[in-house]
Image (cartoon, helix red, strand yellow):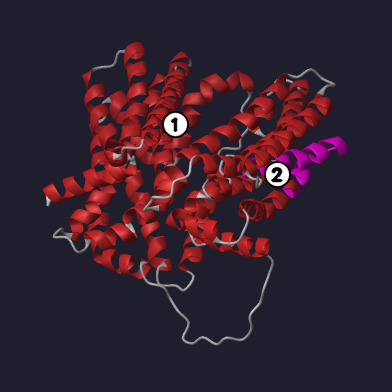
Amino acid sequence: MIRQIKLLTKLQICNLFGINEVRFTKDKKKKARFCGLSVIWAILLVCLLSYVAGMSFVLVKLEAAQLIPMVLSGITCVIVFVFTFLKTGKVIFQQKAFEQQIVLPVSKTAIIVSRFLTMYLTNLLFTVMVMGTGGVVYAYLVQPNISFYIYGVVCTMLLPLLPITVATMIGVIITAISCRMKYKSLVETALTMLFMGGVIGASMFSSNTGQIAMEDILQSLARMLEQQIGGMYPPALWVGNAMVSGNLTDFLLFIITSLGVFGVFLFCLQKCFLSICTALSTNAGNKSFRLTELSTSSILKALWKKEIKRYFASPIYVTNTMMGYFLMVVFPAIFLIADLGNINIINGAKSLEQTLQMEAVIRKMFPFLLAIMPSIMPTTSVSISMEGKQWWILQSLPVSKEKIIQAKVLADLTVVAPFYVVSEILAIITFRPSFLEMVWLLVIPAVYILFSAVAGIVINLHFPVFDWENETVVVKQSAATFFVMLVGAVTCGIPMGILVVLPEGFEMIYMAVVILLVLGGTGVLWKSKCVDR
C-alpha cells in the first residue's frame, strides 16, 4: 500500500507542475516557457518571503513578538483553506484519472490518500516557506529556547493538515449533494458560492467594531490580534502557545486534533468515494424527449450562448473567476453596514480634520478599489484554454476568429454586469458622491472591466493550454492566469497609488487621462490580436 501511495503521489505531482512534459518534450519553446515562468515564480516567492519577514520584524518592534507564530499560522491556514476548498472537488474526484486508476491493481485507499497527499505536499511547501521565514526572524531577534525549534518543526509539518481536511470535507459534502442532481454543476457552484459568502459575512460581522484610539493601538495590538485570531481559528492560538511558551498541553491538543480529524475524515471518505466518482461520471437525463420547435440565432448570439453554458458547466471555473466579482459587491457592502464615518481607522484619528482627510482618501481610491477586483481574474483569462482539445472544432467552423473572441468577451461582460450594477448602487448609497465623483465611480470600474476582458483573451491566446486533464490546472495554475492577475493588479494599483499622492485640484484631469489610457490600451490589444487580418 505504501508503495502504491508513493507511486501515485509522485505521478500526480509530476503532472501537476508539468515536470514530466518538460523532461521528455523536444519542444524548445515549452522548455523556455517553463524556465521563464520558474524565474517569475521565484521572484514572486522572494517578494512574498520579504513581506513575511518585514511583518515579523514590525511585530518584534511593536513588542508583540509572541504573536508571530500565531499570526503566520492563522494567515497560512486561511490561505490553504480557501485554495483547497476551491479546487478540492476536481482534485479528489478526478474523473479521467479515476477511470484510469480504478482498473489498476491498486487499492481504493491508496488512490484517496495519494490525492490527498498531493494537496498536502503542495500546501506544505507554502507553509514551510512562510513559517520558516517568520521563525528565522523571531529566532534571530528574540533568541528563544530549544522548545521553540522542536515544537515549531512539528507544528509546521502538521499545520496544513487541518485546513486541508476541513476544506476537503466541505467540498466533498457539496459534491456529494450535487452529484446526483440533474444540474449538478450549477448546484455545486451555487453551494460553493453560498458557503464562501457565509464565511465572508460571518467574518465581517464577528469582527470587533469597537473604537480604538490611535494612541492606544500599540498597547492593544497584541490583545486584539490574539482575541481575533484565537476566536476565529483556535489551532493557531495553540501553535503560538506551543512555540512561544513551550505549552505541552496546547502542542498535544493541536497534534491530536489535526491527526484525529484527518483520520475520521479519511475513514468516512472511503465509504462514499466510489459512489461519488461514479455519479460524477454519469449524466442525468429526462424521462422523455419531444421535439417541439427549432430556433435560429445569429452567429455571435449562438457563440455567446455556448460560452455561457460552458462557463456555468464548470464549478471550478465559476468559483475562481466569480470570487472577484463577488468581492466587488461585498466591499461596498462592508462600508455601508459599518458606516463610513464609524470605521475604526477613521475613529482612530486624533481630530475631525484627520477624519475628513481619511474619508477623502477613501473616496478617491474607491473607484480603483472597485475596478481591481473584477480585473484580477476575468473569465476570458482561461476561456481559450478551457476549450481544451476541442479548440480545433471552433477553428474549423465557418466563423471568423473575431466573432469567436467577441463572444468570449461578451460572455465575460454578461457575467460581471449584475455584480457591477449592484456594487455601484451600494457605493452610491454609501458615499453619496457629487456629480463628478459619481462619473468616476461609474466609468473607471467599467473601463477596467472591459480592459481586463480584452487583456485576458489576448494573454490566453499567447499562453494557451490545451492538453490538460483537470480543469484546476487551467484555472489555477496556468501561465495565463498568473499574467492576467499581475496585469490587473499593476494597471489598477499604480494609478491608485499616484492618485493618493496627487496634489489637490488635479484629480479631474488625472482621472480623464487614466480613462483615456485604459481605453486606448484596450483598443491596441484588440487590434493586435483579436481582429481578423
The segment highlighted magenta reads 425-453
* Position in image of residue 354 (x %, y %): 74, 21
Residue lying at 51% horizontally and 64% vertically, measured from the top left = 186
Q: Secondary structure at mark 2?
A: helix
Foreground residue among 507 and 353: 507
Q: Would you say residue 249 sits in the magenta stretch?
A: no
Q: Nearer the viewer, mark 1 or mark 2?
A: 2
Is residue 380 in sight in this rendering? yes
Report the residue marked by disc 1: 226
Q: Name the residue beneath numbered marker 2.
A: 336
Mark-to-mark CA distance, 1 and 2: 27 Å
Q: The residue under label 1 is which amino acid type?
A: Glu
Classify residue 467 as left or right of residue 215. Answer: left
Q: Position of residue 335 (x, y in %)?
A: 68, 41
Work out which quarter of the rendered image holds the C terminus and state it: top right
| Place of residue 463 in the rendered image (x, y in percent of width and height, measured from the top left) | 49, 40
Q: Is residue 143 above or below residue 369?
A: above
The picture quadrant where one finds residue 276 is bottom left
Query: Which of the pair 68/183 is nearer the observer?
Result: 183
Q: Residues within 10 Å of mark 2 (few under 14, many from 20)?
A: some
Q: Is residue 300 above or below residue 282?
A: above
